[in-house]
DNA sequence: TCCAAACTAATGTCGTAGGA
DNA sequence: TCCTACGACATTAGTTTGGA
């Protein structure tokens, strides 16, 4: 199955080497999409759920993600998370887009670009930068917004150099076997499905219900969903729930039992079982780790 | 994309044990 | 005593497969 590329309508124009953008919106776009351009994104202010490749996780202000070519992704705020009453936009981010082939072609004229090329390949699974590397890159991203001409390009190269030299200060996000089978034509249907799951994962979501959302019967939906996400519908929902549980476990005053029910599990036994399968540690161990 | 059948994974319940 | 973790087991719902 050949993936179809999405085109960034306001992305990198043919004469540009890269584009830097600051976004302030009431909430992030819910569209699940991918594009040929690499994207470096810093979440200045917002929180919610995100999908990168086959990883479903929570995001918060401050994170820095680098997405390589063609990895499907979405940052999602629910209405509840958007703090609709606030006068200020709740979704604030900085992004840099560039075409990797074009950039490498230009850079190769000046010398060996193997290190950057290798990093860009790794980034096809999505990269979350951490520690000092993240702080340095974020600082440079703010600088780039104020710069013009050659200075902007020099700063971009600095950023690439920091990221590709950071051997330990990043995590790869999508699983190693992840392959993008996503098609542009699927966009609307998958958006509806993800939106429904994200808005309703605290309740029971039956296969019939979600298949109706996708306008398919249950068998067709199972096949469709697995083909696009490389995981079953139940697995996806449970990962969403466990991701939410991880967030709640940071609040010491809520008991693990309460968290289990809050996340949509109907009994603690199931919650413990899935938590350990997905996170490799029990909820209590996880809480101890993050609170320490 | 649909359907039927077979298979498998997820779920709920109960019991037990350890630690605070 | 309560909370948490975990195992066993029966049941149910979800998933896969193959043909159309």
Image: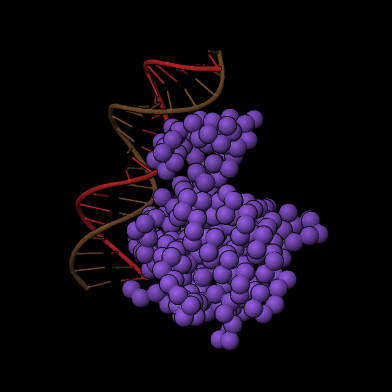
Chain colours: A purple, B red, C brown
In the picture as drawn, the residue positioned furthest to the right comes out as A87
Q: Where is residue A136? Give x, y as percent.
A: 62, 57
Q: Nearer the viewer, residue A183 or A166?
A: A166
Relative to A132, say whether A123 is above or below.
Answer: below
Residue A65: percent from left, percent from top: 55, 59
A36 relative to C19 in the view: left or right: right
Task: Give how far across and how far down residue A77 sits, in percent.
Answer: 63, 57
Residue shown at the point (65%, 65%) measured from the top left: A141
* Residue positioned 58% across, 86% down in the render: A15
Report the front residue among A149 and A189.
Answer: A149
Who's the residue at 52% across and 46% down the image?
Answer: A243
Quadrant of the image containing the N terminus of chain A = bottom left
**In the figure, A91 relative to A243: above or below?**
below
Residue most extreme to the bottom? A15
Q: Is residue A272 left or right of residue A150?
A: left
The residue at the point 62 percent across, 31 percent down is A252
Quarter where residue B18 is shown: top left
> Which x, y percent locates residue A161?
53, 64
If the image is split into quadrants, where does the C terminus of chain A sit? top right
Q: Is residue A118 above or below residue A13?
A: above
* Camera sees residue A27: no
**Quarter where residue A84 is shown:** bottom right
Count the marks: how many?
Answer: 0
Question: Would residue A258 be found to the left or right of residue C5 on screen?
Answer: right
Residue A64 to residue B13: above or below: below
């Amino acid at each position: 199955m050949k993936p179809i590329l999405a085109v960034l309508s306001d992305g990198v124009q043919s004469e540009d080497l890269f584009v830097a953008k600051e976004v302030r919106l009431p909430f992030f776009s819910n569209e699940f999409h991918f594009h040929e351009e690499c994207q470096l994104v810093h979440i200045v202010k917002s929180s919610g759920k995100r999908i990168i490749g086959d990883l479903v996780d929570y995001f918060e202000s401050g994170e820095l993600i680098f997405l390589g070519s063609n990895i499907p992704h979405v940052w999602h705020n629910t209405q509840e998370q958007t703090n609709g009453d606030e006068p200020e936009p709740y979704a604030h981010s900085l992004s840099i887009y560039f075409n990797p082939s074009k950039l490498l072609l230009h850079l190769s004229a000046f010398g060996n670009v193997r290190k950057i090329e290798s990093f860009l390949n790794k980034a096809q699974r999505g990269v979350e930068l951490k520690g000092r590397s993240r702080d340095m890159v974020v600082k440079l991203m703010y600088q780039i917004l104020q710069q013009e001409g050659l200075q902007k390009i020099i700063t971009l190269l600095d950023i690439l150099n920091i990221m590709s030299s950071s051997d330990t200060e990043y995590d790869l996000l999508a699983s190693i076997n992840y392959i993008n089978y996503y098609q542009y034509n699927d966009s609307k249907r998958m958006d509806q499905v993800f939106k429904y799951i994200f808005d309703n994962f605290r309740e029971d979501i039956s296969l019939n219900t979600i298949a109706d959302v996708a306008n398919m019967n249950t068998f067709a939906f199972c096949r469709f969903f697995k083909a696009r996400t490389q995981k079953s519908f139940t697995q996806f929902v449970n990962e969403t729930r466990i991701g939410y549980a991880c967030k709640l476990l940071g609040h010491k005053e809520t008991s693990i039992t309460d968290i289990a029910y809050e996340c949509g599990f109907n009994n603690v036994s199931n919650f413990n079982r899935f938590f350990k399968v997905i996170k490799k540690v029990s909820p209590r161990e996880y809480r101890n780790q993050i609170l320490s």
